[in-house]
């Protein structure tokens, strides 16, 4: 295969991969609990993994502007999923942390999404499962690479 042909094949594969990942992400978003947006769920997951954060830190981690994160956090607070606390080192700052309800919601969302995927995987042939396992390892390497 020539360099040009290889480039075209790579571009076509990239297009198919992008579309497949986007469609799968959409299907998984549809498995989320009612009444929570993908942005809200993502913010909760970041607080779960990173611990207490300021609003500015959370906005940076989620790659959104602080005013956007302010709206997201306000909705999460109203729902009782996050709480604010005064920073012990700098009393002018407040930290955001998950509540028990926020932790339960994340666990429920993950469980539902995992069950959806497990059911779909369960319908695959052994050969397709092996292929999917190999592809998953490649995708895991993709996301470990820096942007």
Image: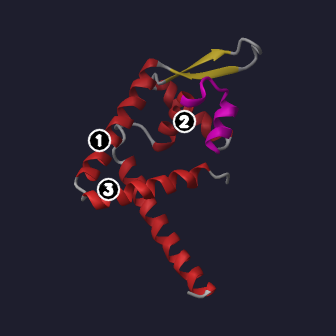
For label 2, the SS is helix
Q: Which residue is mark 1?
A: 115
Q: Which picture quadrant has residue 19?
A: bottom left
- Magenta stretch: includes residue 50: yes
Q: Is residue 103 above or below residue 137?
A: above
Local packing at callout 1 (Cα closer than 10 Å; few below 14, some 14-19, many 20+) is: few
Of mark 1 and mark 2, the one earlier in the sequence is: 2
Question: Real-space Cα distance between discs 1 and 3?
Answer: 16 Å
Report the magenta residues as a range.
49-63
Local packing at callout 2 (Cα closer than 10 Å; few below 14, some 14-19, many 20+) is: many
Say the numbered circle drawn on residue 43.
2
Please state the horizontal and vertical placement of residue 77, each as a whole percent of the image. Answer: 51, 25
Q: Residue at x 46, y 43 (%)?
A: 38
Please state the horizontal and vertical placement of residue 129, each as a whole percent of the image. Answer: 32, 56
* Residue extending furthest toward the left: 123
Q: Is residue 48 above or below residue 34?
A: above
> Closest to the observer: 112 or 73?
112
Local packing at callout 3 (Cα closer than 10 Å; few below 14, some 14-19, many 20+) is: some
Question: Real-space Cα distance between discs 1 and 2?
Answer: 22 Å
Say the numbered circle drawn on residue 129.
3
């Amino acid at each position: 295969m020539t360099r040009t042909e290889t480039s075209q094949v790579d571009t076509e594969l990239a297009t198919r991969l992008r579309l497949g990942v986007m469609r799968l992400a959409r299907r998984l978003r549809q498995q989320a609990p009612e009444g929570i947006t993908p942005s809200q769920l993502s913010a909760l997951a970041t607080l779960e993994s990173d611990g207490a954060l300021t609003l500015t830190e959370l906005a940076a981690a989620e790659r959104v502007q602080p005013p956007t994160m302010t709206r997201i956090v306000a909705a999460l607070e109203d729902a009782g999923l996050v709480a604010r606390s005064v920073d012990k080192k700098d009393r002018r700052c407040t930290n955001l942390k998950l509540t028990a309800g926020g932790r339960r919601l994340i666990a429920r969302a993950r469980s539902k999404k995992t069950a959806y995927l497990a059911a779909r995987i369960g319908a695959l042939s052994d050969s397709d499962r092996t292929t999917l396992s190999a592809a998953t390892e490649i995708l895991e390497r993709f996301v470990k690479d820096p942007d």
